[in-house]
């Protein structure tokens, strides 16, 4: 169970009002005023401290809850730092430029968005990480979309949809393993069961992306300018594919993501020193600040001037604030009160599945963290599913369909902030086109409501 001890039990109506006020405030600052998400989250922390103190909760308990919430982000924070290094090292080793170059060879105007969605999904299943997929092949496809003068919003939506399909269906995905573990379901049974809702969502998304794709079958407009500029960087070599191959091998042998990304980054850096002539002393500045391209073609410069630890600091600071905010929501009893009330009133299959999905979505929206969404929702509803005769597979499926895929649609969430930063497309811009993520919870609610107890 969640390690933070609840120090206050507000009435459910009071908890709901606080919940609505905080979500409204965060939405107003981000959407209405256009501030960075850090600001409303920090204001929310101040308000929850004030609320807790008014309810006679000791400052030490409030502070401890905030710190415990933030502590849960440490694993993700170190991974984000390494992804920053991975992006910069993959650029200077030529891996990302080579991916872009390859992309031009397989992509045309016709079915462009559908191809982006499908290829990203395949890579996502192979790597088992939505964020790594987005930061590598996703960045390449954004560059191709820019060259085609395609809609970056739809392109980003296709990337996010494909990446999170992979995140759901890969046995190497941490969220897939978490969802199956938290409710004690065999991993491959879990993947088999979620395919009942995931495959329909994939098919519908593919059709929508195919319909939205440009009608022209001509080659990418201006592709020669991009290809010449990419070659002019001097970064692309036959060795440029090695870091990607290394990463895939690590995934096949189930090496932890932290080590896999670290190994691939180090290999890429070594290759860059050998093939690209970058001085040894300059490498470490690129690791921190990212690579700056200096070709005569500005679009390629913008595309390749990315990466580095420094590029992840915006995301890292927001993750710490968001999870600290989540810790305060638990220590003050706001979320536990709402969840307890829901659990006590639910009896019917449809209402239970709908409530499970809405709870997972709500935790994503309020806390911005998909792991907590899966863990807390799973722990809350596990006994209730047993009580009414629903199987654990039904719960693990709903956790994935409404927990994992919703996080990239929340502007202040861990995934949302990371993806917006990496792709340079705001969350609210690509959200309407992240079809797979939008369809998954809808399909699981429809499917769950029509399924008999024994078959779940």
Image (spheres, rainbow, N blue to C red):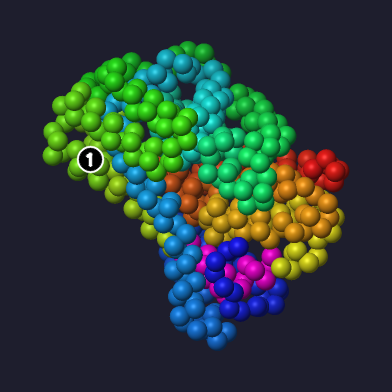
Our reading of the magenta stretch's main secondary structure is: helix
Q: Is residue 48 magenta?
A: no
**SS for tag 1?**
helix
| 55 to 39, vertically: above or below | below
Left or right for 329, reference 447: left
Residue denoted by label 1: 286
Q: Position of residue 235 (x, y in %)?
A: 25, 24
Residue occupying the point 42% across, 21% down? 103
Out of 307 and 29, give the one closest to the viewer.
307
| Number of numbered discs overlaid on the protein picture | 1
Q: Position of residue 268 (x, y in %)?
A: 28, 31
For label 1, the crowd category at 10 Å Cα-Cα, with few meaning under 14, some 14 to 19 and many 20 or more, is: many
Q: Position of residue 76 (x, y in %)?
A: 43, 51
Q: Is residue 323 magenta?
A: yes
Residue 218: in sight, yes or no? yes
Out of 22 and 413, give the one closest to the viewer.
413
Q: Quadrant of residue 345?
A: bottom right
Residues drawn in magenta: 322-339
Residue occupying the point 15% across, 27% down? 277
Residue occupying the point 50% across, 29% down? 126
Q: Quadrant of residue 292?
A: top left
Quadrant that contains the N terminus: bottom right
| 192 to 392, vertically: above or below | above
Q: Quadrant of residue 91?
A: top left
């Amino acid at each position: 169970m969640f390690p933070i001890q609840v120090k206050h039990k507000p009435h459910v109506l009071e908890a709901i009002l606080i919940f609505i006020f905080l979500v409204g405030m965060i939405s107003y600052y981000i959407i209405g005023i256009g501030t960075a998400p850090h600001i409303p989250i920090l204001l929310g922390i101040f308000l929850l401290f004030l609320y807790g103190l008014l309810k006679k909760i000791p400052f030490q308990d409030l502070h401890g809850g905030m710190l415990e919430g933030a502590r849960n982000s440490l694993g993700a924070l170190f991974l984000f730092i390494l992804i920053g290094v991975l992006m910069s090292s993959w650029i200077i080793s030529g891996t990302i430029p080579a991916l872009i170059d390859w992309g031009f060879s397989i992509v045309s105007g016709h079915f462009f968005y559908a191809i982006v969605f499908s290829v990203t999904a395949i890579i996502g299943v192979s790597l088992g990480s939505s964020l790594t997929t987005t930061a590598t092949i996703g960045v390449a496809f954004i560059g191709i979309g820019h060259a085609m003068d395609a809609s970056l919003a739809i392109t980003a939506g296709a990337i996010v949809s494909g990446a999170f399909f992979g995140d759901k269906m890969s046995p190497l995905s941490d969220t897939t393993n978490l969802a199956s573990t938290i409710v004690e379901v065999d991993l491959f049974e879990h993947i088999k069961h979620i395919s009942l809702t995931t495959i329909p969502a994939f098919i519908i998304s593919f059709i929508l992306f195919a319909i939205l794709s440009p009608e022209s079958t001509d080659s990418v407009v201006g592709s020669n300018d991009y290809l010449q500029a990419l070659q002019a960087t001097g970064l692309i070599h036959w060795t440029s594919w090695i870091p990607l191959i290394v990463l895939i091998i690590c995934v096949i042998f189930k090496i932890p993501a932290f080590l896999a990304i670290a190994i691939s980054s180090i290999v890429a850096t070594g290759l860059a020193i050998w093939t690209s002539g970058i001085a040894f002393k300059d490498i470490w500045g690129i690791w921190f600040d990212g690579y700056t391209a200096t070709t005569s073609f500005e679009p390629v410069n913008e595309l390749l001037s990315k990466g580095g630890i420094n590029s992840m600091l915006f995301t890292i600071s927001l993750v710490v604030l968001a999870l600290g905010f989540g810790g305060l929501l638990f220590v003050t009893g706001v979320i536990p009160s709402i969840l307890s009330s829901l659990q006590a009133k639910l009896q019917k299959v449809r209402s239970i599945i709908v409530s499970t999905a809405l709870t997972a979505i709500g935790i994503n929206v309020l806390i911005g963290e998909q792991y907590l969404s899966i863990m807390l929702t799973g722990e809350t509803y596990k006994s209730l599913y047993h009580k009414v005769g629903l199987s654990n597979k039904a719960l693990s499926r709903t956790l994935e369909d409404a927990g994992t895929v919703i996080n990239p649609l929340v502007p202040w969430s861990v995934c949302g902030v990371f993806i917006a930063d990496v792709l340079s497309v705001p969350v609210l811009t690509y959200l309407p086109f992240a079809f797979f993520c939008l369809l998954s919870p809808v399909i699981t609610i429809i499917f769950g409501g029509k399924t008999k107890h024994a078959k779940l």
